[in-house]
Amino acid sequence: MNKIDSFEALKHLENTGFFIVRNYLKETECQEIIDEITLKINSFSRGDGMDFRHPNFENESSLTKHFLMNKELQNICDSYMQSPLIKKRCQAGLVEHHTNTSISSGGGWHVDKRSKQFKAILYLNTVDDSTGYFCIIPQTSKKLDEFKTVPKFHGDTSMTRFETGELIEKGIFETRVKILGNPGDLILVDTSNIHRGEEIQKGKRYSLTNYYYN
Ligand SMILES: O=C(O)CCC(=O)C(=O)O
Ligand SMILES: [Fe+2]
């Protein structure tokens, strides 16, 4: 398991909105977690992108619990957020390709919140250009007011969803960073930057996501 250079991580989070830690978890451990997800898949529900999600997988898997309770990640979260943690949970996700259906993790360009939000996303299998990679437009959190938002559903006032067309028109779509990776690669991210899970073109993507609520 690789240790995180927290100075670098905090600097990158501040400057770009994300930081990648390669090879954070062993591939054998990732496979164990995939096996646990596979066993429990009937208790998962569909997310916004028609992906499968379990909101509290730490209750089903000790390796997942260990990932959620990781002190190193918590310390980076504390330093970055500069506000006390209220609760945390670990979501397990499976994005699976189906012909003629658009499936992604999260469904389209969005921010989770319009204010700082720290998350840690762990890829459990190989994520290439066609397996629903995480994608982020760096340095967007401080200029959200420049973009119009679209409601997620009738009456939605969260102002968290954006249209691809507008991101292209305003010239920031081109600056997006596609995060591909191997099993065990970890993404630390401030999800108040515009991001999405890309639509999956083939195969499956398994991941764990730590949610930290401050
Ligand atoms: O898992 C991903 O690639 C991103 C998911 C996401 O943005 C979300 O669930 O808010
Ligand atoms: Fe998100």
Image: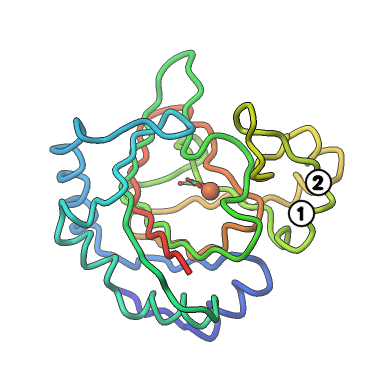
* Residue under numbered circle 1: 144
Please state the horizontal and vertical placement of residue 61, each as a whole percent of the image. Answer: 15, 55
Q: Is residue 55 above or below residue 21?
A: above
Q: Is residue 126 above or below residue 47?
A: below
Please state the horizontal and vertical placement of residue 140, each as a whole percent of the image. Answer: 73, 58
Q: Is residue 148 above or below residue 48?
A: below
Residue in the picture at 69% in, 59% down:
138
Query: From this viewpoint, which residue is outermost toward the top?
Result: 100
Q: Is residue 179 above or below residue 11?
A: above
* Residue under numbered circle 2: 147
Question: In the image, 59: left or right of 95?
Answer: left
Query: Can you tell which quarter of the image residue 122 is in?
Result: bottom left
Tell me if the residue at label 1 has its CB under 8 Å from ligand 2: no
Q: Neighbour class for label 2 at 10 Å: few (<14), some, many (≥20)?
A: some
Question: The disc labelled 1 sits on which kind of residue?
Answer: Leu
Picture mark count: 2
Query: Can you tell which quarter of the image residue 3 is in?
Result: bottom left
Query: Can you tell which quarter of the image residue 161 is in?
Result: top right
Identify the secondary structure beneath mark 1: helix
Residue in the picture at 16% in, 38% down:
40
